Image (cartoon, rainbow, N blue to C red):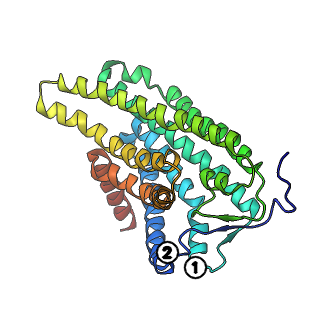
Amino acid sequence: MGTVCNDTHGDFILRGFSDKPYLEKVLFGVILVFYCLTLAGNTIIIFVSLKDPKLQIPMYFFLSNLSLLDICFTSSCVPQMLVNLRSPKKTITYSGCATQLYIFLWLGATECVLLVVMAVDRYVAVCHPLRYVTVMHPKVCLQLAVLAWGSGLIQSLIQSTATLRLPFCSQRVVDNIVCEVPALIQLSSADTTYNEVQMSIASVILLVLPLAIILSSYGAIVKSVLKIKSPAGQKKAFGTCTSHLLVVSLFYGTVTGVYLQPKTHYAHEWGKFLTLFYTVITPTLNPLIYTLKNKEVKEAVIRLWWKTWISQR
């Protein structure tokens, strides 16, 4: 017999770091700065990729998608996070929590798939350069982008709906900074075996399998690059891939720590900081990584800045 609740749609409390008030004051300022940098940095990447003719290639089309994704991803949770860090109540309505869950999971799952697509793009560019233009045709790139966004949406609709069907009775304190699947499952008073199995399967499909594909792609890339006799050629080939590999490491390293961690109090407390990292820090670092480690992007930003300055003069 299922658990019956008198009120299944009341407000939630996002507990977050409320037991560390001194930390909340610091986090508010840090998160606000990083959020502004995320919006600015990723907007610049999108604008430059659209305006500069030299960046009208698949790699930067996918990079623009990643930047748009990061803007939406952080915006789905950071504003509420900032409000709660300054408020003693730290409440979020049921509809607000549900909306955040759907969008947060959708964009997170989309990024998992999009990073795989970007790895495949680099694999084709390095390992099959003569076929690159044919294989990575603009129509194919658009289809791959739609696949990433669409598969993420389907995953969110399935898992978020299953999570929100759980009864949340007297215990409505979410011990996290966002409405996230693991925290909500832990909060429910019902048998959550089905949801935990579903989350485990989703984690394998969206985390383990994509990471295996990415590592396999880069394994093939390394073998191909080592066959290049010219050191300059090797450096250029590696240079096009290191940025993406660093972004993958930051994102998967933190997300897997949240969704594949053991169920212990220590792991749960550490998971809050991991969630904070991939929702706030990583989206800020992505445009910096691609700008600082990519000569083409740096030159495009300089050209855009120069044209803007000339037009204003």
Residue 10, by quadrant, is bottom right
Q: Can residue 57 be seen in this view?
A: no
Indicate the position of residue 102 as horizontal and vertical percent values.
67, 50
Where disc 2 sits, the SS reads helix
Q: Which badge, 1 or 2, is on the more N-terminal residue?
A: 2
Q: What residue type is labelled 1?
A: Arg
Q: Is residue 304 visible?
A: yes
| Residue 196 drawn above or below residue 226 | below
Tag 1–tag 2 contact (CB < 8 Å)? yes
Residue at the location (37% across, 45% down)? Answer: 249
- The residue that label 2 is drawn on is 28
Q: How crowded is mark 1: few (under 14 residues within 10 Å), some or many (20 or more)?
A: few
Q: Nearer the viewer, residue 200 or 264?
A: 264
> Disc 1 versus disc 2: distance between alpha carbons?
7 Å
Q: How crowded is mark 2: few (under 14 residues within 10 Å), some or many (20 or more)?
A: some
Where disc 1 sits, the SS reads helix
Q: Nearer the viewer, residue 61 or 173?
A: 173
Which mark is on residue 86? 1
- Locate the C terminus by quadrant: bottom left
Residue at the location (75% across, 61% down)? Answer: 94
* Side (left or right) of 95 relative to 19: right
Indicate the position of residue 136 as horizontal and vertical percent values.
44, 26
Indicate the position of residue 133 as horizontal and vertical percent values.
39, 23
* Side (left or right) of 227 relative to 297: left
* Side (left or right) of 90 relative to 47: right
Q: Which of 30 and 139 is in front in this view?
A: 30
| Residue 221 drawn above or below residue 68 | above
Residue 170, by quadrant, is bottom right
Q: Which amino acid does label 2 sit on?
A: Phe
